[in-house]
Image (cartoon, grey):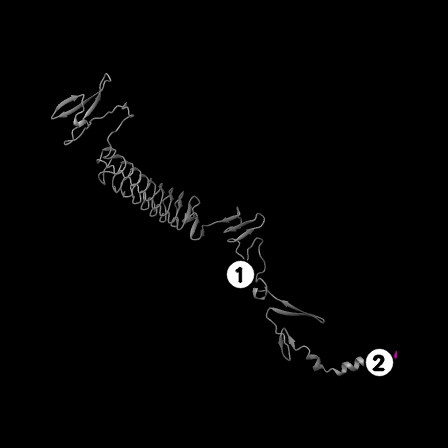
Amino acid sequence: MKIRTSLVASIFLLVTLVAPTEALAVVQSLNSQTGQNQTFQNDSNVTISSSNNIHSLIWQGLLPVSRGGTGASSFTSGSIPFIFNGIFSQDNTNFFWDNTNKRLGIGTTSPSSALHVTSDALINSLTIGRGGGSISTNTALGITALPSNTTATDNTAVGNRAMEDTTTGGQNTAIGATALLRNTTGARNTAVGLGSLASNNSVDNTALGHFALTSNTSSGNVAIGYNAIYGNTTGNNIVAIGANTGGPQDTASNSIYIGKSAQGSTSDENNAIVIGNEQTTGAGTNTAVIGNSSMTDIYFGSANSNASIHGKKLYLGSSSIPGCIIVGDSDSSGVTYLTVNDGVLTSSTTAPSACQ
C-alpha cells in the first residue's frame, strides 16, 4: 500500500508542475503554419456535425475539381467525361462509348461499328463523308470536295475541290483535282482526271483524261485522252478519242475525232469525221477524212481489197493533181491503169506517172 500511495503522489506532483500555457505551446504548428493560435475558418460548403464529444466535418454540395472532386453529381454509363468550365461534363449525343460492343460513337449514342461518325470527318484538311447537305447517297472525299451541295443526290466527288460549286446537280461522278469544279446544276456527268469538265455546267458529258473537256459548257460530249477537245465550249454531241484530239474546236457539233491531235478544219464545223494520227485535219462540215498527209494507201475490207465501195461520188486527184484508177485484169494476169486528161480516158498496162 505504501508503494502505491507514493506512486500516485509522484504523478500528481508532476502534473501540477506543468502550467496550462506550456501544454498549449505544444500545438502551435498546424499544416506547416506556425503561430500562437491556430484557427479553423468555416467554408460555406463545410458544416460541423457534433454528437456528444464526436465532431465531424461535412462537405455540402458537389466537390469541385479544385478540391479533388468532379463537380458533377453523376455520369451515364458510357459517358466520356471532359473538363468544361472547371467541372467534369458529359455530352453523350456527341461523344459516347458503348462498352458492351466496344464501339465509339461520335454524334450518336448507338454506334453500329467500331467507330461510328454521323457527320463528315476532317482529317488533315481532307473531307471524308457526304459533302454539303449531308445527303445519304452522296460521297465526298478530298479537300473541299462537294462542299456547296444542297439537295443534289447520287454524286461522287473524289479529289481536291472536286465538284466544288455543285449545289443541285445530281448523278455526277468527279474523280480528280478540280474535276467538275464549276458545275452547279449540271447532271449525269462523268469526269475523271485533273481539271476534266472543270468549266462544265451542262448534262450528259463524259471526260476521261487530264483536262479533257476542261472548257466545256454544252452537253452530250465524250472525250477520252489528255486534253481531248480541251477547247470545246458550246459544241455538243462530239466524240473525241486520243491525246489533244479535237484541239481548239470550240463550237463544233455532231462530229467524231479519233487519233492523237486529230481535229477539224474549222472551229464550228458540223457532222464531220476525222480519223488519223499526228495532226490529221478534217475537210469541214459533212465530210470524213481518214489519215493524215503522210498516208499513202487506204484499204477497205482487208489488204486484199475484197470490200465493195458504194457512194454517189468518188473524187480522185484534184484540178492540179491527176487521178488514177488501177483495175485488176479479169484473167488475173496483171492490172490496167486508167487515167483521164481533158475528158479523154487512157488505159495502159504500164503505170503512167499519175499512178506512181
Label 1: element kind:
strand
Which amino acid does the dot numbered 2 rest on?
Answer: Ser
Along the line of sight, which residue is nearer the eye, 325 or 129? 325
Q: Mark 1 points at which residue?
A: 83
Q: Mark 2 points at which residue?
A: 6
**Mark 2, other Cα within 10 Å: few <14 / some 14–19 / many ≥20:** few
Along the line of sight, which residue is nearer the eye, 157 or 341? 341
User: Which stretch appears magenta?
Assistant: 1-5
Label 2: element kind:
helix
In the shown orientation, is residue 117 left or right of residue 29? left
Q: Which mark is residue 10?
A: none
Specify which label sits upstream in the sequence, 1 or 2: 2
Q: Which residue lies furthest to the left in this view?
A: 342
In the shown orientation, is residue 290 left or right of residue 68? left
Magenta span: predominant SS is helix
Q: Which residue lies furthest to the front in this view?
A: 350
Q: Is residue 30 above or below residue 152?
A: below
**Mark 1, other Cα within 10 Å: few <14 / some 14–19 / many ≥20:** few
Taking the spot 64% from the left edge, 67% from the top edge, the residue there is 58
